[in-house]
Amino acid sequence: MEQQDQKHKTPGQLITSLLEEKGWTKRATATILGISDAALSKIAGDKQAVSAELAVALEEIFGVGAEEFLRLQQGYDLARARYASKPNPKRAARVKIHSDLPVAEMISRGWLAVDNPKDIESIDRDLMRFFRQSDIEHVVALPFAAKKTNQDEPLSLGQLAWLYRVQNVARDMLVTSRFSPHRENEVVSKLRPLLASPEAAREVPRVLQDAGIRFLVVEGLKGTKIDGVCLWLDDSSPVIALTMRHDRMDNFWFVLRHELEHVFRGHGKQAPIVDADIEASAPIGDRADDEVVANAAAADFCAPPARIDSFIARKAPLFPERDFLGLARVLGVHPSLVAGQIRFKTKRFDLFSRHIVKIRSSVLPSSIVDGWGDIAPIGD
């Protein structure tokens, strides 16, 4: 078969050149190909595409590979599409958003008011409303600064979405008391008796409300691994939000006391402090100073580390249950809190499993909740 040079840019140009080279008329050629004169004229003028079947027929009469006709046709079609297509910088932003953000989950949970999950324009508009941005591209490159437990990792879009939801709900919450950092001892003393039973945790929202602290529970988006956040709506309006992704009494109190310490020390006023995957985070000595302080306060509140360390040193590796329950009674806390600390320190998560109790059902009824089927009402 003849080899063609690269001077032809379209299949029509190649066909016209071959007809001139052969000295054939379009009418005769059309008859041989089994198509009308008008059809061949359109093909030669690049007004009708060359199909695979026609490319094979052209190969037979001209001796030029069918692949060449199809290559030129594909290149011509692509060039036309690029010429006709308007630049759309939003495409890359949309790919990033729909890859990194659980849009469908946000719609199902009522965070986005979108009727048709395939209506991209509607999703764009509501995402801009949700994130308080003027352009969908700004959502991808959010300038929102937020500190995270692991200082080397930025927040993901999913984590940012949770944080924005917390802020949106918290803004509509009312508090009856003005917050004062000097009330820390008073608040902690009111919370401490609640460590005796999981049911007593229903009093937590009231205690924090009386101290001028907004408290809410917002279920995390899938894969975000957030435990809690400390943020401020203004210099005198602190907010504590938990995900309660681990439905355990020991985890609830540790995370709550951790965030409470942030609040009373004024941490997070410049940017929210998001605590993600607290149980799997780095040892205390490798953490930022404010995290060291918050962790120490939480551990001491739940079960003083010195008492836990002493118990482990004296009783390992058997940990008699009678002695374990005795320690919980002496400390005046539910056994779940002592068990949680021992399990964490020894990495023996098989220990005291029957004393690890759930607490979510005690906390949610008295709290502002967004998740598990409930949608927190917020204003526009």
Image: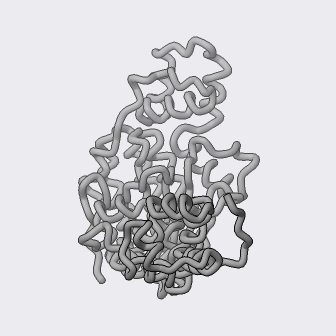
Residue 219 vertical position relative to residue 30 in the rendered view, above or below: above
Q: Residue at x 34, y 48 (%)?
A: 201
Residue 124 vertical position relative to residue 156 in the rendered view, above or below: below
Residue 53 in the image: x percent, y percent?
44, 59
On screen, residue 29 versus residue 343, left or right, reads: left
Q: Residue at x 55, y 34 (%)?
A: 341
Residue 231 in the image: x percent, y percent?
51, 70
Q: Residue at x 51, y 42 (%)?
A: 302
Asked whether the viewer can see residue 266, the reply is no
User: Which residue is more in the foreground, 327 or 142?
Assistant: 142
On screen, residue 5 versus residue 49, left or right, reads: right
On screen, residue 156 versus residue 218, left or right, reads: right
Is the C terminus in the top left, top right, bottom left or bottom right quadrant? bottom left
Q: Quadrant of residue 216?
A: bottom left
User: Which residue is more in the foreground, 68 or 328?
Assistant: 68
Count of numbered circles in the view = 0
Q: Quadrant of residue 293?
A: bottom right
Q: Residue at x 50, y 17 (%)?
A: 323
User: Which residue is more in the foreground, 313 or 118?
Assistant: 118
Is the N terminus in the top left, top right, bottom left or bottom right quadrant? bottom right
User: Which residue is more in the foreground, 129 or 260?
Assistant: 129
On screen, residue 329 versus residue 18, left or right, reads: left
Asked whether the viewer can see residue 53, the reply is yes
Q: Quadrant of residue 65?
A: bottom right
Residue 138 in the image: x percent, y percent?
54, 80
Residue 368 in the image: x percent, y percent?
30, 63
